[in-house]
Amino acid sequence: MPENCIYVARSSAIAARALAGEMMVMNSADSTFFTLNEVATAIFQAADGRTPLREIVRDRVCEQFDVDPEQAQADAEQFVTELSSHGILLVSHQPLASETPR
Amino acid sequence: MSLMTEVGQKAFELGVPLAVHMDVTYRCNERCVHCYLDHDDHGEMTTAEIKDVLDQLAEAGVFFLTFSGGEVFMRRDFFELVEHARRLMFNVKIKTNAVMIHEREARRIRELDVDTVQISVYSHRPEVHDAITKLPHSFERTIKSVRFLREQGLKVTIANVLMTVNSADHAGVQKLAAELGVHYTLDPTITPMMDGDMSVLSLRIPGAELPDIFHNPALVDSQEEFCAPPKPPSKEDLEGYSCSAGHSFCYISPYGDVFPCVQFPLPTGNIRQQKFLDIWNLSPQMKEVRSIQAKDLTVCSSCSHVSSCSRCPGLAYMEGSMRGPSTADCEKSFYRTGVPTANMLRQGLAKPRGRSGNHAPLIQIQPIAVPA
């Protein structure tokens, strides 16, 4: 999958809330519970299904945090892969509609 | 320490209302013999009002939201409220008698990704359950609904309130829960009526029967730890707080009244007159509740159980002082460990109440939606 073609969106199945700048995320289907650090929270909040991941990393991560762009992109892809395996983020080569509860 | 516990502690320290229990109605289609509520509608919040409250709760940082009642499905707009709550990304739990849940409702609950549905079941014997709810065929309807919910893959918990009339049935209900593939919780709490009427407390299980529950490995995990004699309190214990009520948890009634807990009837403000966060942050009552450390407790600070007691400040408040002892929890500590509490010794009680003792409620409800 070419890096610049990854689109991510938050699943409607999850519960999420920020606590002191860090996002709590829970998937009721399997009761998995995560807390995301500030960088991961920034990616999660920007995951609207329309903005490519590379753009999110550039604008929301590299702009706001002191990180190496290539490392940030690699970390972001790993993070997105992990959360998608738990049904928390949806990943596609095409733009996605960010889900709202049905 | 689990991640969930860490988050709970962080919210507690920051004063963030992580979990809220909201009763959306006190109306009910059952008339349970032990119920503490007045089921007449004295002016419930409208759909728009509750949606506005939910918006405010999301803004305030609430993550775990429990919808309860009364019977939540007595509100025709209930699914509209759940939809709104899920749109705001709350983790939603529903407490219900399930009588009005059919296939369609079960499917809708699943579509909305509700976390858990907690259902009251009083006995595995239909005649006992129906005699408690005073609704004919309620057992049959409730169990049928549990099956609908399970068919949808939903997490269901059967809550088994124990009282004199069903005290021998917990093993049967536990077995039924296992057959249905659902969780089981036992709750021997009987709460005074909202108007202060204590007569309903005659349904409590006699204190002398509590050891049968506390020392039953099928009901209580970690017997050794749970029933161990209390350890001497540390400085940290004495600077600790009773529970999350008013710290990271609160209760909202169908009329918009905000309380520290569902079992702590200290009014702190009304959401129809003030913003939720103004009540949460500025209410003198909330601040007072938050200020009380174990060392400030009038009797309990010198009690050997102070570091391990489940003392409920709401029950203590109902007994006369939120800084005083909660007789119900004194009994619980005594019957759990065999060691008398400072409150018992102070009163010269050779033994706590038996079958016809005082009428303090038994054991605190655990309303917090945050799993350990």
Image (tube, grey):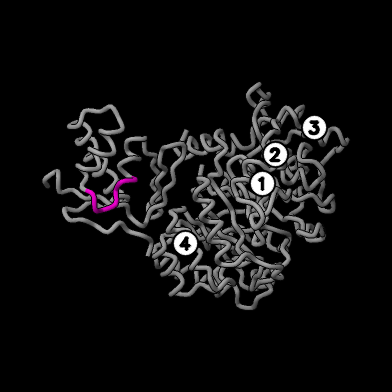
The residue mark sitting in front, 1 or 3, is 1
Q: Chain of mark 4?
A: B
Task: State whether discs 1 and 4 lie on one chain.
Answer: yes
Q: Nearer the viewer, residue B46 or B338?
A: B46
Residue B324 x, y percent position in the rendering: 79, 37
* Residue most extreme to the bottom: B136
Q: Nearer the viewer, mark 3 or mark 4?
A: 4
Image marks 1 and 3: residues in contact by CB distance under 8 Å: no
Q: Quick one: which residue is furthest to the left in this view? A: A2
Q: Which residue is mark 1?
A: B260
Q: Earlier in the sequence, mark 1 or mark 4?
A: 4
Q: Label 4 near label 1: C-beta < 8 Å?
A: no
Residue at (21, 50) in percent of width and height: A7
| Three-letter residue code for mark 1 | Pro
Q: Amino acid at mark 4?
A: His
On whether residue A49 falls in the magenta region, the answer is yes
